[in-house]
Image: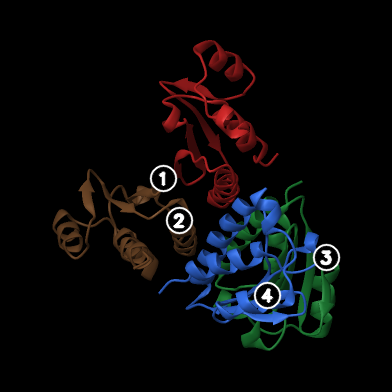
Chain colours: A green, B brown, C blue, D red
Amino acid sequence: MCLMAARQKLSDGEVSARLSRLSGWTLSGAQIQKTYQFRDFSEAFGFMTRAALAAERRDHHPDWSNSWSRVVVSLSTHDAGGLTELDFEMAEEFDRLIPH
Amino acid sequence: MCLMAARQKLSDGEVSARLSRLSGWTLSGAQIQKTYQFRDFSEAFGFMTRAALAAERRDHHPDWSNSWSRVVVSLSTHDAGGLTELDFEMAEEFDRLIPH
Amino acid sequence: MCLMAARQKLSDGEVSARLSRLSGWTLSGAQIQKTYQFRDFSEAFGFMTRAALAAERRDHHPDWSNSWSRVVVSLSTHDAGGLTELDFEMAEEFDRLIPH
Amino acid sequence: MCLMAARQKLSDGEVSARLSRLSGWTLSGAQIQKTYQFRDFSEAFGFMTRAALAAERRDHHPDWSNSWSRVVVSLSTHDAGGLTELDFEMAEEFDRLIPH
């Protein structure tokens, strides 16, 4: 029930409201995207591993690319044809994984 | 509901029956244990990463150790004070991750 | 000495010869690229973890992207301004990591 | 040459001197050991992945175990029959991977 709700497509207004509470994420078509810059490959891949665990736990996976110390993450809910609450929850969770 | 059932402690008879359908797992007190032997560290850690994803998905985690190409896995449901269906499901899932 | 040699830019003829011995890799500008298709995210990320270990061991890292069960890998030696022996060795190593 | 030196067995005095510069590591027979406590499994496994990359880079691997948020690491140089400079370098590197 709860997960069903989280996977319903958000309206443009809801997307804007949710996006304004995040830092570094931008809207790109039906996706939100962020570029994470780490110190080196090890730190980048450590982040990716923890993000992979979070993705598997929610059964919701990012489209992402990595080049050495940089990771670009795109989130969207393909089944819903756009952005859902699940994408924003995951964006917040990924942000919490960044080393300070 | 389904997950509650999976986390109920199994009787000794149920444990024996479930154990007999697995290969390489042995009963050790309130745990089942298996030693996996891989070709090298990379293959061992590749297995561990996939097992970690499976563990996080089920929110049920192994006690395990690794030394180069060897991984020893122990499974038990601490909350239930013994072995549950969840442990045997995870044992089967870990076995499916072994490269052939 | 050995590593220096491995990081020297190959001629077009050498690239063609090396490429012809690989399967599924294509030349794209100054890079070679391959799309790996796995069964699911777990298998894809297990491959990525082993590939990350191989990359770190050689201190030579791929540009790559992942979407669920698909991994696209690009290899090039940025310092050499093109393709080197190191890229082809890594391509062969990545291919050996695919589950059969 | 450099790596050969790093893999020579240290004397008891050298071990004591090196150990005194580390925090949380204890001598246990011919090994040094440390227990890392993380916040949860994700943080623990993120550490393990980065430690695995460091181990593969040096071709020197830990004996370690994990239980949810705890990771116990043992280091020794089996070929040298005891502790070497390589073990202490790796201990320092693992310590640098801890999130603050």
| Residue A41, image x, y percentages | 70, 54
Residue at 57% in and 75% down = A3
Q: How packed is label 4: few (under 14 Cα within 10 Å), some, or many (20 or more)? A: some
Q: Amino acid at mark 4?
A: Val
Residue B4 locus on image (x, y percent): 37, 64
Residue at mark 4: C15
Whole-Å distance between the Cαs marked 1 and 3? 42 Å
Q: Which residue is the extreme one toward the bottom?
A: A81
Q: Which mark is residue B48?
A: 2
For the residues labelled 2 and 4, the Cα–Cα distance comes to: 36 Å
* SS assignment at label 3: loop
Q: Earlier in the sequence, mark 2 or mark 1?
A: 2
**Of tags 4 and 1, which is closer to the observer?**
4
The residue labelled by disc 3 is: A21
**Nearer mark to the viewer, of 4 and 3:** 4
Q: On what subunit does the disc labeled 1 rest?
A: B
Three-letter residue code for mark 2: Met
Tag 4 and tag 3 share a subunit: no
Q: CA distance from mark 4 to mark 3?
A: 49 Å
Q: Are marks 2 and 1 in contact (CB under 8 Å)?
A: yes
